[in-house]
Amino acid sequence: MARQGRSGPGPGPGPGPGGSHVRPNAWRALLSGLRNGRVVSLLIFLTCVGILGYLLTQARFSVLQIEVIGNNALHTEDVITESGLLGRPIWFVNPAESEAQLRANPYVESVQVQIGLPNQARIHVVERRPEVRWEAGGVEYLVDGRGQVLAVAQEDANDDVLVVIDTSTPDLKPGDQIDTDALSLTRALALRLPTELGFTPAQIGWDFGVGVYVRSQTGQTIIFGQNRNLDRKLAILATLIKEQTAFTYLDLRSGNPFYQNSPQN
């Protein structure tokens, strides 16, 4: 006799052709996420992360173009190096930090750093310019930054005032014009000789025949002439000082500098 099978629901037939295996709960969760904004928020978050990663890692957003304005005695390359800006991601640049680094340079009076997208920086430098007095015929005259004589100095010069001795001009009057190249060179020498060479001149002067010259504390005369090739002239003088070469007269004007060592009376 055949045994009667257990009653109750069977496993039921599987999905027919074209049927879906996706459970309705997954669709409901997706639709619920869309309705309450969770999925959209996740997509926005992932997009923002991707954009942020792109901005932080792309080389085109690193400082690659730097413009230096206002430098005269300072070399552009030195300003760029001391700023610490070149190659840094623009998002991590702190202009105040770069300005502080540059102000540590003895040539810098003030400085302003500006950043621009995508990879630019501008450094505006104001160099230290010693106050200049031009002495002619034993009289000191006040001179402005463009070399124009203003007036006769009424007070004695302080230690930080540059007094240029003019051995060619008997006298000056307000409105007269000083050679601008000579003015620029005397200022540069007043700053660079002590700072770069450890050489403090006893006197800086100008003569119509030789141009700008300096005299050392021991009586040496060093002729610079004009501003042209100043770096080369300073390098030659630095070498002679380092090698302790004895000289009483040094002419740096030509491509082949001349010096001599004459006995001093």
Image (cartoon, helix red, strand yellow):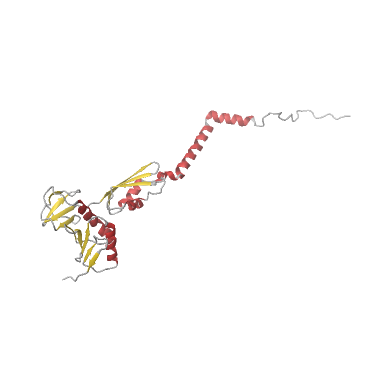
State the quadrant of the N terminus.
top right
Query: Where is residue 69 drawn, in percent x and y?
Result: 30, 47
On the picture, is 55 further left or further right than 201? right
The front one of 186 and 126 is 186
The front one of 27 and 212 is 212
Q: Quadrant of residue 243?
A: bottom left
On the picture, is 119 further left or further right than 244? right
Query: Where is residue 12 drawn, in percent x and y?
Result: 74, 29
Q: Residue at x 58, y 31 (%)?
A: 30
Query: Where is residue 159 drawn, in percent x and y?
Result: 19, 57
Total numbered labels: 0
Query: Where is residue 144 drawn, in percent x and y?
Result: 18, 48
Q: Residue at x 47, y 39 (%)?
A: 51
Which residue is farthest right? Answer: 1
Q: Is residue 15 above or below residue 99?
A: above
State the quadrant of the C terminus.
bottom left
The front one of 7 and 101 is 101
The front one of 145 and 195 is 145
Which residue is farthest front? Answer: 255
